Image: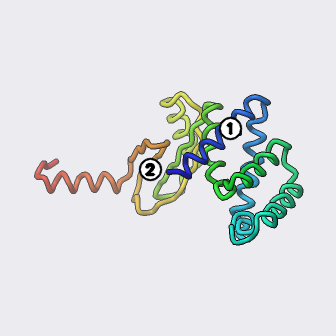
Amino acid sequence: MINARIARRYAKALLAIGREDGQADTYKEELAGFARLVDENKELEMAISNPLYDAESRKKVLVAVIEKAAPSKIMSSFLSLLFDKGRIQHLGDIYVYYEKLTDELANIIRADVASAIELPDETVEKIKASLSEQTGKQVTVETTVDPSLIGGVVTKIGDLVLDGSVRTQLISLKESLQRGEGI
């Protein structure tokens, strides 16, 4: 819970700067790239966030990586601030919140669609169009395959879950029959 608050606070601060100077999307790309770099290179993550190494050495590693990546001046300062405040280990969470905030700003929502089989592109587009119509927002869809669904789809938008899977329908039918409700 504390990590979420920390991540949200730093993401909001960066977004405020991005809105002010019109570079919110640039910062999103830079933050994504740096978060991905750290996530994919565990040695780098340890080198900049492990307190067993002295702070001066960790800062030198971070500065060298920042210079090599050559992000904007604001992003360089932001990353240095995270390090100085002992928050660099929250970089991935900060990016997740920053992405959510910039999506809200751009009137975009993300939907996760799971299906038993790979969905054809035209089906994904129909789902996207339907969700856009229902929410009044631009929808970005991420699809996954979950064979345990048997058929149908399960769509998640934030905390909302729309479950149209055959598995759930079968479970409901079973429960209904067990209660003696019949069909």
Q: Secondary structure at mark 2?
A: strand
Compared across the picture, whether 135 is left or right of 22 comes to left
In the picture, the disc for residue 158 is none
Q: Looking at the image, is 166 positioned above or below residue 10?
A: below
Name the residue that disc number 1 marks.
13
Seen from the viewer's position, the closer of residues 179 and 51 is 51
Q: Is 67 above or below relative to 141?
A: below
Q: Amino acid at mark 1?
A: Ala
Q: Secondary structure at mark 1?
A: helix
Q: Are marks 2 and 1 in contact (CB under 8 Å)?
A: no
Q: Nearer the viewer, residue 119 or 58?
A: 58
Which residue type carries mark 2? Val
Location of residue 146 in the rendering, given as x and y in whole percent from the top left corner: 47, 60
Dividing the picture into quadrants, the one containing residue 171 is bottom left
Which numbered disc, 2 or 1, marks the residue that appears first in the sequence? 1
Q: Which of 181 and 56 lies nearest the eye of the viewer?
A: 56
Residue 8 x %, y % = 59, 43
Q: Gap in Å between the C-alphas at discs 2 and 1? A: 37 Å
Picture residue at 77% right of the left edge, 48% below the top: 30
- The residue pinned by badge 2 equals 153
Give the residue at x 44% y 50%: 153
Looking at the image, the residue that sits furthest to the left is 180
